[in-house]
Structures are given as structure tokens and as C-alpha cells.
């Protein structure tokens, strides 16, 4: 309690507040628009959109080779600028490669992956990947500059544009593609805002940038490409596999129910935990670089996140089966049951998300990747059991149980490697 009390006036909590002030409003808008979207679009149409997003997220996870995550680490701003432009270069190459593959093999891929319902919307994948990843790269750049207010406003702009675009296109009679196009337009709006805002910040983002220095940064932070990128691929794949498998082995409606449940569960996580990740990563990297103690800082923030999240998730667990049929409308009862099953797992994700930066900072990407690869295999096994028995509830129960177990282990490992690093700095 004393530690929590001392955080009331801390810069860490204030910076999280800045991030959450806009991000929270954006997610509240997103939650508010769910009852509208579920009354415009059918579960099948939302399932098609969720399938598009799942493929998009899997490809986006590796499109920059995760170099943007190294933006916070260099001591000088010029070095960080080279990391930023290295990320842009890799992203553009990845987006052009995806476009080429779709132009050459688009119809065959739709048939192979059971994406016939997407039609020509599949050609929006490169645009969506490019704009979303540009937004993420600029977010890390702004994070280093401690421009938390601009990050929050950009997220509000993107989320508002997505919600408005999806609802507007749905009301306009474009239900077949309104969800997908609305998302792409929202991502574009967020990127344009950050580009416009950058002109008002002192110091050029291009200062000190050269191909030679970019190559040097690529070599220095090669572990992000070698280990963190496959790690991100396994993490994103395991998170999005349920939608893809449910779409293939059950129905588009089941995929839509699950996608809506996951989105509702992750909304509070994205509001607090992702904001905390941005602030936590900057602060803990700064402390470690200055050879300060990091364990007390980790203790305080774990206690803060657990305290903030416990009661909301507990309430959500008990009321979700009754809440979501009322909130989303007739025909969405299954979503409430899915939310109840996923709640314990999502609560642990909420606590663990900011701590995911610790292996990156301590250059422990290799083991983090191995853990996540095992995690992916266990989740696939859990889903496969449910598919084998043709029981979607069993599949989600096992999926959530695996998530709880692995996240508990990861939290203990994050703490152990952080304590070891601190002991090396401050030997007894």
C-alpha cells in the first residue's frame, strides 16, 4: 500500500494518464459503437472482417523485422533516427513484396486459405500493413521523445476514424466491405496526424540519417530481426489462430462471435496495459542505461496494474453472459459465454504486457522466442482438441487455460532475469 501511495504523484503514473486520456476515450468510443456494428453487420460479416484482420496482423508482426522496438535503446537521438528509418525501409520492402504476391497469386491464395468471401478486399492487405506499421514506427519515435499526448491524440484519431468509417459505410449499405475499408481509412488518418504533428516538434527526424549508419544499426540490433521477429510471429499467430481455425472448421458466425469476444476483452488491456508498456519501456530502459535499480520499479508497477485490473475483470467474469446479449443484441449470446471463459487469461495478459519489454532490453530474445514457440504449439493443441470433438466451448476453455499457465510462467521469468541483471550491476 505504501508503494501504491508513493505512485500517486509519480511521473510514471502521470505519463500513463497522458497516454490513457486519449487512448481511453478512443476505446470507449470503440466499445460504444459495438452495439451499432452488431446491429448493422451480421456475425458472418464480422467473421469475414475478423479473418482479414487476422491475416493482416500476422503479416504486420514481421513486416518491420521489429527494428522499431530498438528505437528506445540508443544513447543518441541520431542513432535512434537511423533505427526509425531502417524500420521504414524494411516495412516498405515488405509491403511491396506482399502486393506482388497478391497480384500474382491472389485468387489461388483466397481458395487455399478459404478466403473467398473477402473477394478483392484481399488486395487492401498491403495498404493496411503499410499504414498500421508506419503508425507503430512513429509511435515508438514519439515515445522516445516523450510526446505521450501526441501519441494518445493520434490513437483517438485512428480509432474514431475506424469506428466512424465502419458505422457510416454500414449505414450506407456497404455491409459486404464496410468493416475492412473503415479500418484501412482509420489507420491512414492516424498516420497522417502523426506526420503532421512531427513538423511541430523540435529537431528533424532525418538528422544524422545515412545508409551506412542504418546498416550499422541493423547489425547492432540484429537480434530483433533474428529472435524478436519470429517471436512476434508466433505470438501474433497464436492470438489470431482461433479466428482462422473457427472460420475453417466451424463457421464464419463462430469466428465472428469469438472475434467480438476477444475484441471486447482486449479493449481494457489496450487502454491501460499498452499505455503502460510505452511508458514502462522508456522508463525502465532509461533506469537500466543509467545503472539504477530496476526491481523496485518493476515491483511497484506490477502492484499497480494488478490493483487497477482485478475488480473490473472480476465483475466482467460474473456478468458477461447476461451483459453481452443485452449490449450487442439478439443473436450474440455466444459472445458473452466466450468472454467469461477468456477473462482470467486476459487479466494476466493485462499485467504481463508492459513486462514484455524486459527480455528485449536484456537481450534475452532467444529464450523469449522459444517460450512463445512452445506457447503457440500448446494453444494449437488446445484448439485442435476442441475441433476434434467439434466442441467450440471446449476449444476456448483449453485455449484460455493454456494462456493462464504460460503467462504465469512468463511473469516469473521476467522477474528472474531482471533480478539477475540488477545483481550484476549491484553485486552484494
Image (tube, helix red, strand yellow):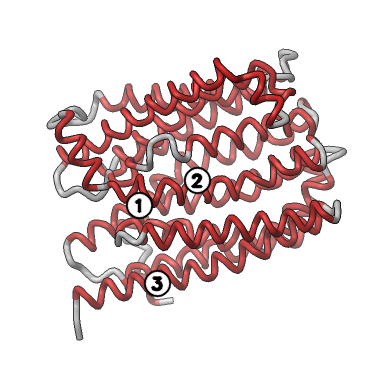
Provide the residue designation for mark 3: 415
Query: Which residue is at the front of the view, 191 or 133?
Result: 133
Q: CA distance from mark 1 to mark 2?
A: 24 Å
**Residue 422: image tag:** none
Lateral position of residue 215 relative to residue 384, left or right: left
User: Please, what secondary structure does the residue beneath circle 1 have?
Assistant: helix
Question: In which image quadrant can residue 357 be found?
Answer: bottom left
Q: Residue at x 69, y 36 (%)?
A: 34
Q: Residue at x 61, y 57 (%)?
A: 377
Can residue 316 be seen in the rendering of this structure?
A: no
Provide the residue designation for mark 1: 279
Residue 354 location in percent, x, y? Answer: 43, 57
Provide the residue designation for mark 2: 233
Q: CA distance from mark 3 to mark 1?
A: 18 Å
Marks 1 & 2, CB-CB < 8 Å contact: no
Q: CA distance from mark 2 to mark 3?
A: 24 Å
**Within 10 Å of the Cα at label 2, are there few (<14), some (14-19), or many (20+) other Cα atoms?**
many
Q: Residue furthest toward the bottom? A: 428
Amino acid at each position: 500500500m505504501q508503494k501504491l501511495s508513493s505512485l500517486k504523484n509519480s511521473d510514471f503514473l502521470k505519463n500513463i494518464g497522458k497516454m490513457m486520456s486519449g487512448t481511453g476515450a478512443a476505446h470507449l468510443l470503440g466499445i460504444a459503437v459495438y452495439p451499432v456494428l452488431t446491429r448493422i453487420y451480421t456475425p458472418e460479416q464480422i467473421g469475414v472482417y475478423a479473418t482479414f484482420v487476422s491475416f493482416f496482423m500476422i503479416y504486420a508482426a514481421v513486416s518491420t523485422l521489429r527494428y522499431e522496438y530498438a528505437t528506445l535503446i540508443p544513447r543518441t537521438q541520431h542513432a535512434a533516427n537511423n533505427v526509425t528509418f531502417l524500420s521504414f525501409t524494411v516495412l516498405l520492402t515488405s509491403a511491396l513484396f506482399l502486393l506482388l504476391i497478391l497480384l500474382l497469386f491472389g485468387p489461388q491464395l483466397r481458395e487455399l486459405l478459404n478466403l473467398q468471401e473477402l473477394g478483392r478486399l484481399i488486395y487492401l492487405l498491403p495498404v493496411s500493413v503499410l499504414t498500421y506499421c508506419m503508425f507503430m514506427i512513429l509511435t515508438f519515435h514519439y515515445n522516445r521523445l516523450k510526446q505521450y499526448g501526441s501519441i494518445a491524440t493520434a490513437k483517438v484519431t485512428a480509432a474514431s476514424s475506424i469506428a466512424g468509417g465502419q458505422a457510416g459505410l454500414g449505414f450506407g449499405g456497404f455491409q459486404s466491405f464496410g468493416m475492412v475499408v473503415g479500418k484501412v481509412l482509420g489507420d491512414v488518418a492516424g498516420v497522417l496526424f502523426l506526420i503532421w504533428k512531427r513538423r511541430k516538434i523540435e529537431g528533424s527526424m532525418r538528422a544524422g540519417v545515412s545508409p551506412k549508419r542504418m546498416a550499422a544499426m541493423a547489425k547492432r540490433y540484429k537480434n530483433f530481426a533474428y529472435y524478436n521477429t519470429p517471436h512476434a510471429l508466433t505470438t501474433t499467430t497464436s492470438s489470431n489462430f482461433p479466428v482462422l481455425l473457427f472460420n475453417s472448421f466451424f463457421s464464419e458466425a463462430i469466428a465472428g462471435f469469438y472475434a467480438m469476444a476477444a475484441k471486447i476483452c482486449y479493449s481494457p488491456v489496450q487502454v491501460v496495459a499498452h499505455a503502460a508498456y510505452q511508458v514502462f519501456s522508456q522508463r525502465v530502459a532509461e533506469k537500466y542505461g543509467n545503472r539504477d535499480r530496476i526491481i523496485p520499479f518493476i515491483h511497484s508497477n506490477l502492484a499497480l496494474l494488478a490493483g487497477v485490473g482485478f475488480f473490473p475483470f472480476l465483475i466482467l467474469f460474473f456478468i458477461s453472459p447476461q451483459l453481452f446479449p443485452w449490449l450487442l443484441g439478439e443473436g450474440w449470446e455466444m459472445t458473452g459465454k466466450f468472454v467469461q471463459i477468456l477473462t482470467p487469461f486476459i487479466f494476466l495478459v493485462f499485467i504481463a504486457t508492459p513486462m514484455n519489454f524486459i527480455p528485449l532490453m536484456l537481450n534475452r530474445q532467444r529464450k523469449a522466442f522459444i517460450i512463445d514457440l512452445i506457447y503457440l504449439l500448446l494453444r494449437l493443441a488446445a484448439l485442435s482438441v476442441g475441433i476434434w470433438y467439434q466442441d467450440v466451448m471446449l476449444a476456448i476453455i483449453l485455449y484460455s487455460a493454456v494462456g493462464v499457465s504460460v503467462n504465469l510462467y512468463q511473469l516469473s521469468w521476467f522477474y528472474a532475469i531482471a533480478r539477475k541483471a540488477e545483481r550484476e550491476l549491484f553485486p552484494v
